[in-house]
Image (cartoon, helix red, strand yellow):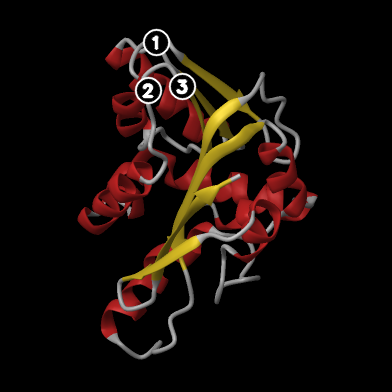
Amino acid sequence: MDELRRRIALRRYRLFAPIYDILPGGLTFNRRLRRETVRHLRLAPGQTVLDTGCGTGLSFELLQEGIGPEGRLIGVELSPDMLARARSKIARRGWRNVTLIEAAAEEAAIPGEVDAVLFFFTHDIMQSEPALNNVLSHMKTGGRVAAAGGKRPERCWQLPAIAAQLVYWPFVTTTEGRARPWAKLARLVGPLTVEERLLGAAYIAYGNN
């Protein structure tokens, strides 16, 4: 991520952090999509999972359900304002198995190897090969990856698609790859199963490293 885009992202998330959980991440549809995406990671107790672009930690509870207290959860997030919200969640829930890293995904010093990686509504990261390469270099062979987010629908005029675009895209700094946001990830990990949602305005992609 170049310096200009970094500043734009930090400014936006500083503004939205206090209410982020009731915006796109908190919508009923997104809660269902989040649960479905995490399910495709096939987590097991004791595993290590990486939440890339973890934001305020909206996926943490679902990930904890999969790995249990004996597992490890690593969250990477660029925005200190979003991470502050994530830390509050961790403290309230008493989770002792979470490591948070404040850094761009391209630069994050991720400790050790992970069994699974989640990319949930992290379009900027999905379009950055340096970010994907850094994250995937820490995945175990055969590890699971799952991604979800907004995409450009074929029928942009339909009302649900229009609403989705208004919700998703204010939070990204690039519109590159909107038609197939998973394409760069697929080139690096191999074939992904891709399923469209919300009349083609959202997707889930998952597979093995």
Give the CA distance from mark 1 to mark 2: 7 Å
Q: Considering the numbered disc 1 on the image, is that residue within a helix, a strand or a loop? A: loop
Q: Is residue 157 left or right of residue 191?
A: left
Q: Say which residue label 1 marks.
A: 70
Q: Residues within 10 Å of mark 1 (few under 14, many from 20)?
A: few
Query: In the image, what residue type sits under mark 1?
Result: Glu
Q: Is residue 26 left or right of residue 97?
A: left
1 and 2 marks in contact (CB < 8 Å): yes
Give the CA distance from mark 1 to mark 3: 8 Å
Q: Considering the numbered disc 3 on the image, is that residue within a helix, a strand or a loop? A: loop
Q: State which quadrant residue 68 falls in.
A: top left
Q: Residues within 10 Å of mark 2 (few under 14, many from 20)?
A: many
Q: Which mark is residue 67?
A: 2
In the image, residue 10 above or below residue 158: above
Q: Give whichever of discs 1 and 3 has the lower sequence position.
A: 3
Query: Is residue 202 at all visible to an observer of this figure?
Result: yes
In the image, residue 120 above or below residue 59: below
Q: Which mark is residue 47?
A: 3
Total labels: the figure holds 3
Give the CA distance from mark 3 to mark 2: 5 Å
Location of the C terminus (image quadrant): top right
**Residue 155 at what x, y percent from top left?**
39, 89
In the image, residue 59 above or below residue 3: above
Q: State which quadrant residue 161 falls in.
A: bottom left
**Residue 17 at what x, y percent from top left?**
43, 40
1 and 3 marks in contact (CB < 8 Å): no
Q: Is residue 80 left or right of residue 72?
A: right
Query: In the image, what residue type sits under mark 3?
Result: Gln
Identify the residue at horizontal 65%, vertical 51% (top origin).
189
Residue farthest toward the front in the current orientation of the protein: 142
In the image, residue 155 above or below residue 114: below
